[in-house]
Amino acid sequence: MVGTTASQGPHRLVVKVGTGVLTAGAKGLNRPRLVDLARQIATLLSRGHEVVLVTSGAVLAGRERLRYPHLGSAIPYKQMLAAVGQGRLMHIYEQLFEIYDVPVAQVLLTREDLHDRHRYLNARDTLLALLERRIVPIINENDAVATEEIKVGDNDNLSALVANLVEAELLILLTDTDGLYTADPRLHPEAQLISEVAQIDAETYRLAGGSRSGLGTGGMFTKVQAADLATRGGTDVIVAAGGVPDVILRLVAGERMGTRFSSVGDRLAGRKRWILADKATEGVLTVDAGAAQAILCGGSSLLAVGITAVEGTFERGATVRIADPQGREIAQGVVNYAAADLAQIKGRHSSEIEATLGYVYASEVVHRDNLVLLRRSEKPIG
């Protein structure tokens, strides 16, 4: 067996398993695959690592229990299947981890749990308490109550948010393919596996394409999305085939497999991790080239004078996206002014805010301490 010691590899990691991995290509949950997953995680725990498991499969477990009924794709049907399947899936995990004397805990999350600052911190405290006591948190999106407005959308992105939440050093996304290829290997046999991606850009997303799976909600595109989020929070990400023997142990030991996405820059402070986690942004502020350059390269706050357009309806304290003159998102942050106020003060100097509005909250629209870069620039923007 290939492994590592507590002094090697990441101390804290998140492992996400997709539906295709859990079924091993079959119609229902593959018990041997689940047993092997529990064994590998138990081995990591015995070597001093901390592991969070993000799992798909609740809806599938519900279908399995109800003998694969023919239902529509409407959200209520999926919620019904998830309500049946979540308990069943967790019961299976609990039984299998019990073989290795590893306690587990179920944690169900929705977007709202990560959008609200207090609930975000509560979720973080719960997960860290579980890890401290060598308990494996098993996380799934709360499909039984989630709606389109609050769904994270897929467990790839959920796993990135969880990695961000617990400040994991490594996120492993296990799927039914070997990683990111130069083209779809199912259509292009000559396609080559990309072993490492130093920076995620538009070309990376183009290569990822869309989902072709009929079982899960994700695909390589959502895995690149997840890697984009996690790496900006300081977490390395590896996409690899879940059916490879001892895949988790080998990856933790440093073996080169799948596609690795390297983390970008320094690890973010806790508040900036929360800002980054809040993908349900409420508006967009477009800035001029000078402001974009100052934010990306100068570590500056966003001032009203650099704003050229305001989109959306939001209040003071909302999380908004910041876009450059070409419409490319460059940052995300918490605003000190409501959208209606910004419509009046955009393009104006900070010294003019009070005269325009009759009051002033701050000289900055978004302070740099409440701002997270989504990309970096090494050349002038314009």
Image (cartoon, rainbow, N blue to C red):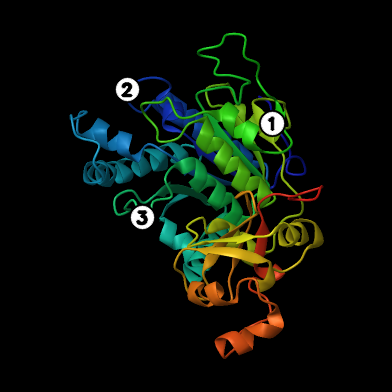
Question: Residue 255's image quarter?
Answer: top right
Residue that label 2 marks: 27
Q: Nearer the viewer, mark 1 or mark 3?
A: 3
Q: Position of residue 53 (x, y in %)?
A: 51, 43
How much space separates mark 1 and mark 3, taking CA atoms?
42 Å
Residue situated furthest top in the rendering: 189
- Name the one closer to the observer, 156 or 55: 156
Secondary structure under tag 1 reads loop
Image position of 374 (left or right of 57): right
Secondary structure under tag 2 reads loop
Residue that label 1 marks: 3
Image position of 262 (left or right of 230): right
Q: Earlier in the sequence, mark 1 or mark 3?
A: 1
Mark 3 nearby-residue class (10 Å; few <14, some 14–19, many ≥20): few
> Residue shown at 69%/63% (left/top)?
269
> Residue shown at 69%/80% (left/top)?
350
Q: Position of residue 7 (x, y in %)?
A: 77, 44
Q: Position of residue 157 (x, y in %)?
A: 51, 45
Tag 1–tag 2 contact (CB < 8 Å): no
- The answer to whether residue 121 is above or below residue 142 is below
> Residue shown at 37%/44% (left/top)?
90
Identify residue type, mark 3.
Glu
Is the N terminus in the top left, top right, bottom left or bottom right quadrant? top right
How much space separates mark 1 and mark 2, taking CA atoms?
31 Å
Identify residue type, mark 1.
Gly
Mark 2 nearby-residue class (10 Å; few <14, some 14–19, many ≥20): few
Q: Earlier in the sequence, mark 3 or mark 2?
A: 2
Identify residue type, mark 2.
Lys
Residue that label 3 marks: 149
- The answer to whether residue 190 is above or below residue 258 is above
Q: Which mark is residue 309?
A: none
